[in-house]
Amino acid sequence: MSDGPAEPSTVPPTGPTPPGPVLPVGAPTTGAAPPGSMPPGAPAPWPAPAGGAEGEPRQRLHPLSPVLHGAKSLVVVIAGLSWSTLSRVGFGWFAAMVAVLALGATVLSVVSWYNTGYHVVGRELRVYEGLLWRRTRAIPLERLQAVEVVRPLLAQLTGLAELRLEVVGGGKTEAPLAYLGVADAARLRERLLALAGRVAQAPTPEHAGAAVLPGAAATAAAPGRPLHAVRNQSLLISQLLTPQAFLLPFGVAFVVVQFLTAGSWSFVAVASTLTAMAGVLLQPVRRVLDDWNFRLARDGGTLRVHNGLLETRAQTVPLARVQTVRATWPLLWRMKGWLRLRLEVAGYSVAEADDRNRPDRLLPVGDLPTARMIVAEVLPGVRLDALALSPPPTRTRWLHPLGRRAFGAGLFDEVFVTRSGRLTRQVVIVPYARIQSVRVVQGPIQRRLGLASVHADTAGGSGATAQDRDLAEAWALAADLTTKAHQARNST
């Protein structure tokens, strides 16, 4: 998906808003647009507030937004009206009930669309919604971490997109604007990121002139310098090399044997068995759908991530907010030399029930040379294949009889690195400047053996842990981490 043309505006990328009116997203810089001159399908602007105190006029969402919201409500209505209702009232009355409820949901969606608007005031994005109970949300752009352009399946079919904002300290994704035209969403994203100081420059001319067609997000070139594109074939094979995929044939065989040997199955037994099988299969299928056509690019101080099949996503991850980089080698992937990379980014909500919108994907699947190149882009000077880590002392064999050397820790010039895991190996890399606190923890068995674990906590909430170090070494390691963290923060 292309980012679309850079929108001319009187708002500078940084600094306070100059006096005078500010043009809306996509408006020309000279003169007022004559009536009827807006492109077809563009969201209609609201009249400017009285006195012009708030600058640019408010913008409405795309006119097709109520249709998409109404379609979602229709699915919920049909799911809520069970088959038992159909058998009791008959098909005619059932269809009438669905039509009335769908019409009511559509009317409510239209009313909600009519009373929802947004505009940029100085260095704030304000979102207005509600009819009886009006609500105004003011989002300071200084706290804005990233803006995502998300396109669910219905939005792809209609050429629309949803804008989601991530704010520092937010408990959830802020102010989702659903839905905007793809070009309008791209322009608004670039403008908000520029005002927040998260982008260094406007889109390049070759991207500015690219046309965005409905459903073309999966094939459009990502802005910035391309780093890597994951082959979909590798993605499919990687999900077949998971415990869920290996257990699925046994589950199917169990169901077939039970069905052939049992005289009859109750509805509850059939439903519970199918639900259990779906739960086993859902995770690898969802990963394939989410990471389909995964592409990574570098654009100044940010990473651009594009992925998704049924729901496409365009995420912008500021490198300055990266807290940790995790490299994981699952057991079955090691026969092909594959691993995956994940990020921990400060400012992203961790209370979301669905964590698919979190920008933790850095490399869904790839080989070591690719991972080494990507890690060097995120953490300059760090070589993933040259991290010599020291194992815990020999007496930890009582705690780790089969895999003592699977654990390790090391201090390097710019980062603290730990290693853990027997079957699934994991390396965690934490820049010193991202360490918020250092803890030395001892359990009852560790006290008997003279061991302790050192935790380096980050703003993202996880950090890295050097497990089962000698007690004297643990305290020395904690002191070194504290000193290096202070020096790194003071030098930035």
Image (cartoon, rainbow, N blue to C red):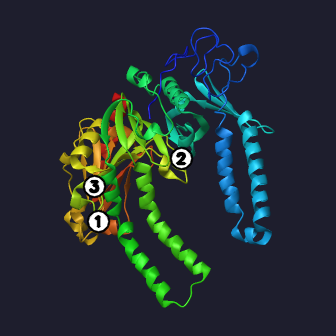
Determine whether 402 is above or below 339 in the image.
Answer: below
User: Where is the N terminus found, in terms of image quarters?
Assistant: top left
**Of the image marks 2 and 3, the number of the one nearer the N terminus:** 2
Kindly identify the amino acid type of the residue bearing the numbered disc 1.
Leu
Residue 392 visible from this viewpoint: no
* Mark 3 vs mark 1: in front: 1
Percent of width and height locating residue 49: 74, 20
The numbered disc on residue 419 is 3
The numbered disc on residue 244 is none
Q: Which residue is mark 1?
A: 423
Instruction: Label 3, secondary structure: give it.
Output: strand
Residue 258 visible from this viewpoint: yes
* Mark 2 vs mark 3: in front: 2
In this rendered view, identify the residue nearer to me: 481 or 227. Answer: 227
Kindly identify the amino acid type of the residue bearing the numbered disc 2.
Leu
* Mark 2 vs mark 3, CA separation in Å: 40 Å
Image point (23%, 70%), residue name: 402
Determine whether 119 is above or below 280 in the image.
Answer: above
Instruction: Label 2, secondary structure: give it.
Output: helix
- Badges 2 and 3: C-beta atoms under 8 Å apart? no
Kindly identify the amino acid type of the residue bearing the numbered disc 3.
Arg
In this rendered view, identify the residue nearer to me: 210 or 458. Answer: 210
In this rendered view, identify the residue nearer to me: 235 or 421. Answer: 235
Q: Which residue is mark 2?
A: 153
Residue at the outermost front position: 92
